[in-house]
Image (tube, grey):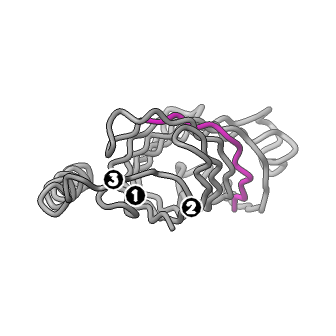
Amino acid sequence: MKKSYLAALTVSALFFSSAHAAPGDDIDHMGIYVGAGYGLLNVDGDDEDFDREDNATRIFAGAQFNQAISLEGGYIDFGNYGNSVFNTDLDGYTLALKAGLPVSERFTVYAQGGNIWWKADINATDDNDDVDGSDIFYGVGVSFALTENLDLRLDYTRFDVEFDRDEIGILAEIDNFDTKVDYASLGIQYTF
């Protein structure tokens, strides 16, 4: 249901923008920008029962230096995921370098990679703990210019979050616990 909602929203925005876009718009894609995104989250952990689908929200701001390179920082709230033995409430701050390739005046495809500084409230059996860490993330996306200043973005990002033994002391029998967090989101971006 959530996937069909995102697809319908994307198609509606594309039709709306096509109907109201002037053919001679000059879109340079450069400048300071802010935005927000909402998307689907899929978590895959070391434990088969750990898989979880949910949603996540993010806000971001960045600087587009030229048609190809931008630097972007943000905040993402993954919500709560896990299983009955081990679950966590995870959020974090991100910093990424984006490399884009304009396909046309309105469409740009891009790849991004960076670091997330995360904080997690871990609940395991009858104990809980607050931990933090730093891991990498990478992803790809496409943006579509609705107007000269407004872009619609579709992103896919993989966050590799690793809880080490010293971070999960409440579960000392586990050496580490790796989770792969896949995030597909639809966002809106405003460039000043």
Q: Residue at x 77, y 46 (%)?
A: 134
Q: Earlier in the sequence, mark 1 or mark 2?
A: 2
In magenta, the rendered stretch is: 109-121
Marks 1,2: beta carbons within 8 A: yes
**Can you name the residue that lies furthest to the right here?**
166
The amino acid beneath tag 2 is Phe
Q: Residue at x 31, y 61 (%)?
A: 147
* Camera-side residue of 171 and 79: 79
Q: Is residue 25 above or below residue 114?
A: below
Give left or right: position of 28 versus 159.
left
Residue that carries the numbered disc 3 in the rendered image: 145
Marks 3,2: beta carbons within 8 A: no
Distance between the alpha carbons at the discs numbered 3 and 1? 12 Å
Give percent across and percent down for residue 69.
Answer: 60, 40
Mark 1: give few (<14), some (14-19) or many (20+) Cα within 10 Å: many
Residue that carries the numbered disc 1 in the rendered image: 187
Q: Residue at x 32, y 37 (%)?
A: 104
The amino acid beneath tag 3 is Ala
Distance between the alpha carbons at the discs numbered 1 and 2? 10 Å
* Camera-side residue of 105 and 38: 105
Residue that carries the numbered disc 2 in the rendered image: 60
Q: Earlier in the sequence, mark 3 or mark 1?
A: 3
